[in-house]
């Protein structure tokens, strides 16, 4: 009985862990998009074309790249920017 209880608690903790990882990942990607668009579009304030380009890059990077790749400008330049041009 004690082993079954420990097993059940372990399963519950693993499930919570997966949910926490997913929540963190989702939050990280949303934060990345917001921050990227803001800093990217600041290069040419008031330009709708620049805002559209920055939004495209941010969205595609958040959808396609790992968290570590998202922080690497060279990866974004090589893999994502060509898709938004």
Image: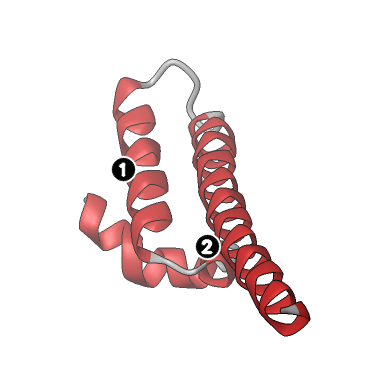
Residue at numbered disc 1: 56
Quadrant in which residue 78 is drawn: bottom left
Residue extending furthest toward the bottom: 3
Task: Determine whether, in the image, residue 3 is placed left or right of residue 64.
Answer: right
Q: Residue at x 59, y 37 (%)?
A: 35
Residue at numbered disc 2: 70
The quarter of the rendered structure image containing the N terminus is bottom right
Q: Residue at x 57, y 49 (%)?
A: 23
Up-down relation of residue 35 to residue 48 (above or below): below
- Camera-side residue of 12 and 57: 12
Give SS at disc 1.
Answer: helix
Residue 38 % position (x, y): 55, 31
Residue extending furthest toward the right: 2
Quadrant in which residue 79 is drawn: bottom left
- Camera-side residue of 21 and 82: 21
Q: Residue at x 34, y 63 (%)?
A: 64
């Amino acid at each position: 009985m004690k082993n079954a209880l420990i097993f059940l608690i372990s399963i519950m903790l693993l499930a919570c862990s997966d949910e926490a990882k997913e929540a963190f990942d989702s939050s990280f990607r949303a934060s990345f998009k917001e921050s990227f668009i803001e800093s990217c579009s600041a290069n040419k304030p008031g330009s709708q074309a620049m805002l559209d380009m920055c939004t495209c890059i941010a969205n595609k990077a958040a959808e396609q790249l790992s968290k570590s790749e998202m922080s690497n400008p060279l990866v974004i330049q090589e893999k994502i920017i060509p898709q938004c041009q």
